[in-house]
Amino acid sequence: MTRPIPSLLKSVTALCAGLALSACVSSAGQRVAYDARDITPEMLLNSSPLAEGAELADLSGIDMLQMTPEMVAFVDGYVDDGLSLHAKMQRLLFAVMGEGNFDLIYDDTTRTASGTFEAHHGNCLSFTNMFVAMARHLGLDAHFQEVEIPPDWSSSGAAFLLSQHVNVFVDFKHYSPRVVDFNISYEPGITYDFNIIYDRRVISDERARAHYFNNIGVEYMLLGGDTVQALSNYRESLTADPTFSPAWINLGILHRRDGYPEFAEAAYLRALELAPSNLVAMSNLASLYEAEGRAQQAEYYRRQVRLHRMRNPYYRAQLAQEDVIAGDYASARSHLRYAIRHRKDEDRFYFLMGLSYALSGDQVSARDWMNQAAKLAEEYGDGQRYHHKLELLMNPSAAADR
């Protein structure tokens, strides 16, 4: 799946390989030259030249989970206090999503719980904030959960979009936990249960707060163009969780965009200290070094990116998809064998393998791989989507006559 434009519904780290940089001399005259190795995290957050003497906003008082009296009245009106915790969960889901009275409408804006309730609009993190706040009001053991969305590369391999999706994890102690996910599917007609397909982990409220302010920083940086507000939000994100590498990367992108490459370099290097395999940080560093004529350092990070990509099953599957389109089925299967060996539960890999056999005329092998894809998908409650695809591939004329 290709998502060429960064979506703001998740914590997003975007690399723009051809980013135009402003001049390195400020209007006030020649600026102070720094060595990236001398720029500390504290300097990046509290002494950034991007502030230009302006006082950064103090965002520490913002409570993204605050319940307003109107929210309390709404929840208490739908959910009887005498119900079991499991029944309370069902009623809350019904109140927010089942009756149609609340009318949650998706947009690209990150909001607090109360802001989402008031606007009835927001992105996935906004809805997650609101649901966690309401669930905790009812006494539910509700947490934020981080979900690793597979990396997505452009066909040229030059641009990256890495996303960490956040949903709700409710622990019932004596019952199976429940996951509430406000995701809007990337592919029409396909709904992913992120609790099953992708790696996930329950995170602290501090980590969720880092996601929240990082998202808002991205919104200011990409949509509003307000550098000081973006900087303020990245600072609050990293105050909440100094180990949150996406915010360090975005802080680097912000500095590079505004003509401070040494501060950008320091931010990217900090991200790599925290997450040594972070491809986006490596790619941004390579692009920065390339622009500055530091060819040896640029090539080092380009090589690291290539090595890490080739170890990633989702990247190998993308190469396989390109090979299938080009008709190089042997190469596609080689990539897919690697992908399946490292991610045995990803049904899309099996489907693509089946497609490679179908297009090369081996219907027996195609049916076998398609059936494996359908069987895996059925374990996740989504098997039907492969049965029609299999029929189309095996008997296209009959399917067309329907």
Image (cartoon, grey):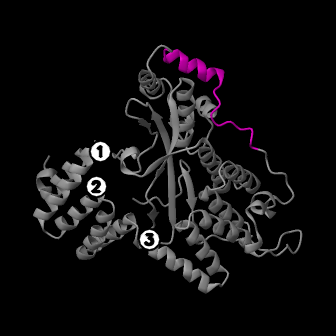
Which is nearer the eye, 43 or 108? 43
Q: Residue at x 37, y 34 (%)?
A: 176
Return the disc, 1 or 3, that comes first in the chain's sequence. 3
- For label 3, the SS is helix
Q: Would residue 73 be counted in the magenta stretch?
A: yes
Residue 200 visible? The answer is yes
Q: Which residue is mark 3?
A: 309
Q: Residue at x 59, y 81 (%)?
A: 298
Which residue extends farthest right?
28
Q: Position of residue 19 (x, y in %)?
A: 63, 70
Q: Which mark is residue 347?
A: 2
Cα–Cα span, label 2 and label 3: 20 Å
Q: Amino acid at mark 1?
A: Tyr
- Magenta range is 59-80
Q: Which mark is residue 380?
A: 1
Q: Amino acid at mark 2?
A: Asp
Q: Position of residue 155 (x, y in %)?
A: 42, 70
Which is nearer the eye, 173 or 331? 173
Rendering quarter of residue 59 = top right
Q: Amino acid at mark 3?
A: Arg
* Residue 178 horizontal side relative to residue 37, left or right: left
